[in-house]
Image: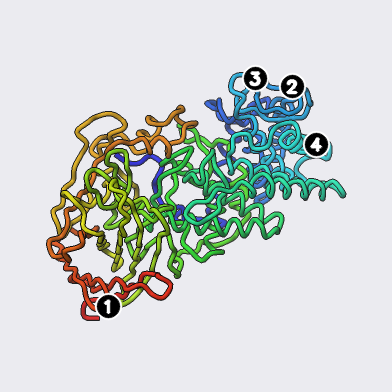
Amino acid sequence: MYLTHQRGPLHDLPDTPEAYDAVLADVVEQALRRLTPEGNLEHPDCVDDIGDTSLGITSLLALAWQRGKDPRLPDAVRRSLAFHLRERVYRDDNPGYPNLRVRDSRLPYARYTLAAGAHPIGDWPSTVWALLQAVNVLDTADGLVDDEQRAELLDVARGYWSWLTEATFFNPQEAGNQAIGCVVGGLMLARLLPAPEDGEVRARALELYAAEIRAHRVRDRGALLPPEHGGAYDNNYGPISLSFLAQAHRVSGAEIFAEDGDALARYIDARLTGGGFDNGGPRYSEQHSAFESVLGLRCFGARIGSDLGRYRGDSRWARHAVKADGGVDGHFAWMLVWQIQDGTPWHRTPSAGPARHQLRAGTVSVAFDDRMTPAVIEAAGAYCLPAAVSRQHGFGPVTDGFLLCRPMGEVRVRDVRADGLTAKLVTKPVVGRDHVLRSVRSLYVTDGTTLWTTVAVERLAGTPYLLAGLPYAEDDGDRVRRTAHAAVTSAGDLRLTHPEAQGPDHFDSRAELTQEQAAFALAEDPRGYGNPDEGWAHLVSSSALEAGPIADAPDDLHVFAVRYGAEEPLVVSVERGEEGLVVRTDAFTAVLGPDDAHAEPQLTLRAVGG
């Protein structure tokens, strides 16, 4: 079974002017066939996210006319714009809308669904989207619509901005992508207004960004991020926020957007595997955006010098939003407009420097979470997630049912590259049920094809083992699909276990249920509104790779050794030497320690024969 939304890397989509002209040509033909006598360009099946969609198609037709001067388009643009202004601009308060600050303002807004009171919660983002569609039409419709219609649309755009920033609470869904999108709408609107109104709207947009978005950033993995639906990052909406930051910087030149975009881009780069797989988020766990992410990933990939385009998108939304039949939907049309207008090329090589929360070389990568525990391990095209035991999640030694991976103090990291090898040493102080403070040293070494992990901890009572991951997905070169297998071997006993109990809080990787589906089943609220990260945190047990300790280790240590990406026998020896703890494999020798004058752990590495 394939993961529905994680398909091809986004940088594989052709992005030449000719490719975009072909996309627009297809949109034009679909739109001209669909255009009703009233001027409606909405998809016949459109119910939700409807308030901006006809205007979105209008904006694409205006851009197509600007690029090709198709004589069929002026009439279609004028008729469809008249439809939006006549039928999709609402001024009466939507019954039941909870986020108004001013009653009966008569300011225009767009509805998420058309029926009064049916589902008003989405009116705020729908109005943001309608503002963005409107300013794109105004930007590209010179010579296409008459002065009266243009003036009416500009007045409605002004009203959208006022409704969003005065008549309602700002960002009522606590969704960073929506909030930054609103700021972008204000910045683009300001360029169309006369003085001094232009400066006032620009200043207000920048003020909202600083006070309502930037001041509320959430820290994760060392980065400050725009909050998304109550969490730090969502792998569907985070790249969309990055696209909004790219557009905000493009239209305003304000460096604050470039700085914050750089930080978000480096964060995405670190959490994203080399193969482009990612999961986790407070709104969606595995769903990925597609063309909505391209602008941000392309612009900021070039800025930070990294191949962010490896991010896997939903190729069904490769160019624009579509319905189930593949027909174009105008929702998110503004992102296709900006994507076409921006000529930044993809940066296709990985960043050169080490990143604290990532180890990456060749086809191997490890993304680490905020506690420097692996969040995803990738090797030989397989992806392993943190496993769960007794409601504890992670990678690390387990003794008496207790997982030793949550730090009790500072986590120290050392990165080393030598002889074609890339390594990271992570040292954590941890406390077990016995309240004894122990140091767990985890060494990760890769040659770009396989990954060796060696974990050393002060000797534990009982029969400890290493919780070494949950085999979850694999890359078949074109798609990501579910799996219950990974090429893994250990220098100690290795077993793949599955939960004996059943139910959503016991995740069996052999079942068809996806991680996202299980996470939503465990969340407190319905799918789409619940927090899958919090839901997944309720997981009691999962399928798990469990590795026993190696026999050849110092008497005061338990040492575990696992190799990902190969199934040949693994031989590892560990001994104490004059320079520290010496780890030997058939591929390398590593020496851990001693600490330097600042108590920082040391690591030396050399390849066998190097």
Q: Measuring 24% from the left and 29% from the top, which residue is drawn there? A: 502
The local secondary structure at tag 2 comes to loop
Which is closer to the viewer, label 2 or label 3? 3
Asked where in the image residue 576 lies, by quadrant, the reply is bottom left
Mark 4 or mark 3: name the one nearer the start of the chain. 3
Contact flag, marks 4 and 2 (Cβ < 8 Å) = no
Mark 3 or mark 1: name the one nearer the start of the chain. 3
The local secondary structure at tag 4 comes to helix
Furthest residue to the bottom? 610
Asked where in the image residue 593 lies, by quadrant, the reply is bottom left
Q: Which residue is mark 2?
A: 92
**Image position of 197 with respect to 601: above or below:** above
The Cα atoms of the two marked residues, 2 and 3, are separated by 12 Å
Which is closer to the viewer, label 4 or label 2? 2
Mark 4 or mark 2: name the one nearer the start of the chain. 2
User: Please, what is the three-letter code of the amino acid marked with disc 3?
Assistant: Gly
Which is closer to the viewer, label 4 or label 3? 3
Mark 1 or mark 4: name the one nearer the start of the chain. 4
Horizontal and vertical percent position of residue 263: 55, 58
Mark 1 or mark 2: name the one nearer the start of the chain. 2
Q: Which residue is mark 3?
A: 96
User: Please, what is the three-letter code of the amino acid marked with disc 1?
Assistant: Glu
Q: Quadrant of the N terminus?
A: top left
Q: Residue 139: which numbered mark, if any? A: none
Q: Residues within 10 Å of mark 3 (few under 14, many from 20)?
A: few
The Cα atoms of the two marked residues, 1 and 4, are separated by 74 Å
The Cα atoms of the two marked residues, 1 and 2, are separated by 76 Å
Q: Measuring 71% from the left and 55% from the top, which residue is drawn there? A: 252
User: Please, what is the three-letter code of the amino acid marked with disc 4?
Assistant: Asp
Q: Nearer the viewer, residue 205 or 83?
A: 205
Q: Quadrant of the C terminus?
A: bottom left
